[in-house]
Amino acid sequence: MQTKTNPLKKLLGNKGVVTIVAVALCLVILFFAYRYRVDKAINAISVPYALRDIKSRTEITKDDVGVVKVAASMVTDNVIRSENNVIGKYVNYNTFIPAGSLFYTSSVVTWDTMPDSAWSNIPEGYTIVSFPVSEQTTYGNSIFPGDKIDLYYSTYDSGKLVYGKLIEGIEILAVKDGQGNHIFKKSSSQTNAAALIFAVPEELHLLFRKAYATSGAQSLIPIPRNANYNPTTTISSDYLKSLILANTREVPLDYIDETPSGDNTTDDNNNNNNNNNNNNNGDNSIDITE
């Protein structure tokens, strides 16, 4: 009577089959070991990135932010890794974030920490003005950075009221409350505006200061304009300009001679030469007489 042969035992007894199985197992082990080493080296993490170009001093919204996976080894310490640390913040005043860029700690700030740099790019010949205002004169705190205003002037001339537009096309650089904090937009915690910051050419700055000094802050009324209003910053009324200047004096620009006061060498030399000439002339006269 023949004994049945175990198929598995017979299969394992085949050296060729055993070799193939061993090689297959080695390949599987190598594959997973390689994947493990690669995944460990890459260690992909999710980080936020910009979906569009974002200009300086712009609030970053959820529509501006996407998420992408990158190798952890490529992410430096100054890369922001959570979109919660980006949304609601602002692009720093000296930064431009291009589309596709990651967000960095140096380029994203809160509005409270935004440097007072709204006037860092003022045109040459312009002067910064801080104009005191109130909730009433800003139309219920409705004037914000980037808005354009006209400045009206009210006074009396020979007992009669004079009222008209003095300067037009002024761009607001910043709005601050009584504590010097920025007011950027309406919010539930918004404080009342206390100052409008803007820049105008020096001629207009002097005219503004003279009007302010002679008639007081209440005589100057800011009037906000719509978004499409974009005239050149200029004087609107020669009559009002003349009226203001009639009550003030022009201060000429005096240029001081920068020659040191103690440097009298040239004068001393000239005096010495003159004295020598006089002495020589005197000697010649004596000789002739003799």
Image (cartoon, rainbow, N blue to C red):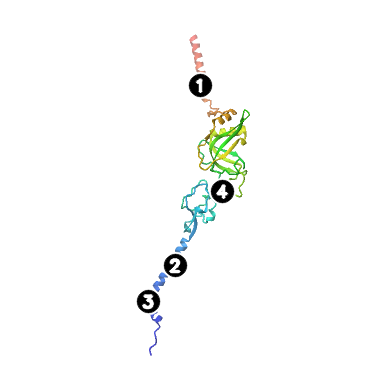
Please tell me in which quadrant of the rendered image residue 148 appears. top right
Q: Earlier in the sequence, mark 4 or mark 2?
A: 2
* Residue at image location 59% in from the left, 37% down from the top: 221
Residue depicted at x 54% and y 54%:
85
Q: Residue at x 40, y 74 (%)?
A: 22
Q: 141 and 111: which one is in front?
A: 141
Instruction: Say what amino acid the circle numbered 2 marks.
Output: Ala
Q: Which residue is mark 2?
A: 33
Q: Earlier in the sequence, mark 3 or mark 2?
A: 3
Label 1, residues with CA under 10 Å away: few <14, some 14-19, many ≥20: few
Q: Image quadrant for the N terminus? A: bottom left
Type of amino acid under label 4: Trp
- Sequence-wise first label, 3 or 1: 3
What number is the disc on residue 17? Answer: 3
Distance between the alpha carbons at the discs numbered 2 and 1: 98 Å
Image location (x, y in percent) of residue 182: 58, 45
The Cα atoms of the two marked residues, 3 and 2, are separated by: 24 Å
| Element type where label 4 sits in the image | helix
As rendered, which of 60 and 122 lies closer to the eye?
Answer: 60
| Residue type, numbered disc 3 | Val
Pinpoint residue 39: horizontal percent, then vertical percent. Answer: 46, 63
Find residue 268 and report its horizontal and vertical position in percent: 53, 23
Q: CA distance from mark 3 to mark 1?
A: 120 Å
Q: Secondary structure at mark 3?
A: helix
Q: Residues within 10 Å of mark 2 (few under 14, many from 20)?
A: few
Identify which amino acid the numbered label 1 is placed on: Asn
Q: Secondary structure at mark 2?
A: helix
Q: Which residue is mark 4?
A: 111
